[in-house]
Image (spheres, rainbow, N blue to C red):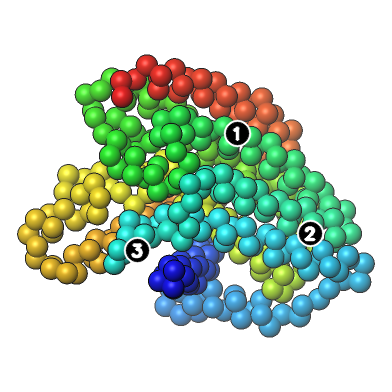
Amino acid sequence: MTFLVLTSLLKIIGIVFLIILPMVSYAVYAERRVSALIQDRLGPNRVGPAGLFQPIADAMKFILKEDFTPAHVNKFYYWLAPGLAMVPAILTIAVVPFGSSLLGVPMVIADINVGVLYVFAISSLGVYGIVIAGWSSNSKYSFLGGVRSSSQMISYELSLGLSVIPIFLLVGQLRLTTIVRYQIEHGWMIAPFLGDPTNIWKWLLTIPMVISFVVFMIAIFAETNRLPFDLPEAEQELVGGYHTEYSSMKFALFFLGEYAAMITGSAIIVTLFLGGWHLPIPWWSQADGFHWLLITGSLGGWLGVLAGLFNIVVFFTKVALLLLFFMWVRWTLPRFRYDQLMRLGWVFFFEIALVNIFLAAIIVAYMPK
């Protein structure tokens, strides 16, 4: 029991404070760099080499700015909202397996058997932070942003939940580590034919899985309020939306909460559709990776440590590539009109995800075991 508590604390410290929070800070830096490249600008280049210390300067700015609370706000909820926006994104990462194992310890903080339900339950709480911020600010711009966010998240959570049901039909489990293991043995969800290229059923299964991936990806954009779904904070229409009345570290929590949600969403996409920590290359062992090193035995007792670290690097590399895709979309596509956003969610994605479940069910029912 003591060992379990100790390893869990070490994983929490490692994943949250050494990986996720630095990734959040440097995702902001990366976004500025990506936008600069797309718009033919320089981007951050003053603080440190290539502007790499810019996140530190930003953090100091937020910490030192006056923490002003307007007189007309509801103070309790005004103070509560930023925490509600940040905490769910951090809590959700607890069930995401970010590697195979290291020194015999599974690289997941909490390997529960209802991992996907936990993800949806906790991530859906993020909307409360935005809605409470919009209401407690007593500003018409903030209130409109909160209302937009609530209706937007309700609309796209349906598509988000329905899009992963084909995965449950195929795997028969809600445990995220089991879903990753299934992909290692049978091919990634986005490309099931990789497990057996001669199996025609696997090629047929690719159709509903790709549809699920596309719907899930777009719904994650809507859930994280990223362009072209950033209606709750549309600066040109609502000044800043739900965080108009916020400053200093309270604003920083909203700002960083969006990037934390992006990282968590990308991690879930990698886990459900892109094989988690696995790479589909010939020398990759199904269990631990580095199969060729296991054969040569050239690294002795350090083999497992090296393999475990490499798996963690593979997982977060996939997450980083998805983050770059999020950023590329933001600086490429225009914002939807609100009626277009709602129509897309209710008239198209909801029906597509529903029909896709029946398509996947038929294929899984007739596919040889």
Q: Mark 3 to mark 2: distance in Å?
A: 40 Å
Query: In this rendering, would 62 be left or right of 133?
Result: left
Looking at marks 2 and 1 on the same chain, the residue that comes earlier in the sequence is marked by 2
Q: Which element type, helix, strand or loop, lies under badge 3?
A: strand
Residue 159 numbered tag? 1
Q: Earlier in the sequence, mark 3 or mark 2?
A: 3
Which residue lies under the disc numbered 3?
105
Residue 280 in the image: state x and y as whole percent.
25, 43
Position of the N terminus by quadrant = bottom left
- Asked if marks 3 and 2 touch (Cβ < 8 Å), the reply is no
Residue 285 seen in the figure: yes
Residue type for callout 1: Ser
Which of the two discs, 3 and 2, sits closer to the camera?
Answer: 3
Q: In the picture, which quadrant includes the C terminus?
A: top left
Q: Residue at x 91, y 71 (%)?
A: 71
Q: Residue at x 57, y 32 (%)?
A: 162
How far across and how far down the image is residue 176, in percent? 44, 47
Q: Indicate whether 345 appears above or below 37.
A: above
Secondary structure found at label 1: helix
Residue depicted at x 86% and y 69%: 75
For disc 1, the neighbor class at 10 Å (few under 14, some 14 to 19, many from 20) is: many
- For residue 255, the mark is none
Other-residue count near label 2 (Cα within 10 Å), few / some / many at <14 / 14–19 / ≥20 = many
Q: Quadrant of residue 366?
A: top left
Q: How far apart are labels 3 and 1 at the CA level?
A: 35 Å
Residue denoted by label 2? 133
Most foreground residue, 198 or 33: 198
